[in-house]
Amino acid sequence: MATKPNNLKVIYTPLHGVGAETFIKVFEKSGFKATNSCQRTSKPDPDFPTTAFPNPEEAGAIDMALGICKRK
C-alpha cells in the first residue's frame, strides 16, 4: 500500500450488499479522496434489482460501475 494518499480513482459498487458505508469510511479515513459509487446499488436490497446475479465475476453484474468509469 502507498505510504501516503494519491489520486487513485475508484468506482465502487456493493451490488446491493452491505459494504458501501464501511468501504467509503475506510477509504476516506486512509486519506484518499472520496470515491464514486453506483448510487443505484449502494443500498442493501436482497432482490438485487439491477443485476440478474450479484456476482462481479458474472457478465453484466458490474455494467453500471463500468458505465460510470467510461463517463469519468
Image (cartoon, rainbow, N blue to C red):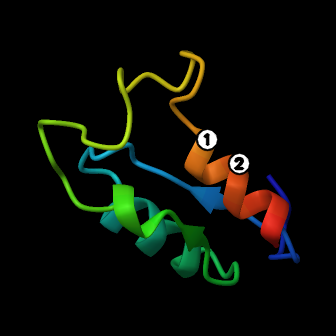
From mark 2 to mark 1, how far is it between C-alphas? 5 Å
Q: Is residue 26 above or below residue 19?
A: below
Residue 25 shown left or right of residue 37 in the figure: left
Question: What residue is rendered at 33% in x and 51% in y?
Answer: 19
Residue lying farthest to the left in this orientation: 46
Q: Amino acid at mark 2?
A: Leu
The answer to whether 25 appears left or right of 34 in the picture is left
Q: Image point 54% across, 15% down: which residue?
A: 58
Nearest the viewer among 6 and 50 is 50
**Residue 5, horizontal then vertical, whole percent:** 80, 76
Residue bearing mark 2: 66
Q: Quick one: label 2, few (<14), some, or many (20+) residues within 10 Å?
A: some
- Residue topped by disc 1: 63
Question: x, y percentage for residue 61?
Answer: 51, 30
The kind of residue on which mark 1 rests is: Asp
Nearest the viewer among 54 and 52 is 52
> Which quadrant does the C terminus fall into?
bottom right
Asked whether the beta carbons under mark 2 and mark 1 sit within 8 Å of each other, the answer is: yes
Residue 40, quarter of the rendered image: bottom left
Kind of element beneath mark 2: helix
The x and y percentages for residue 50 are: 35, 43
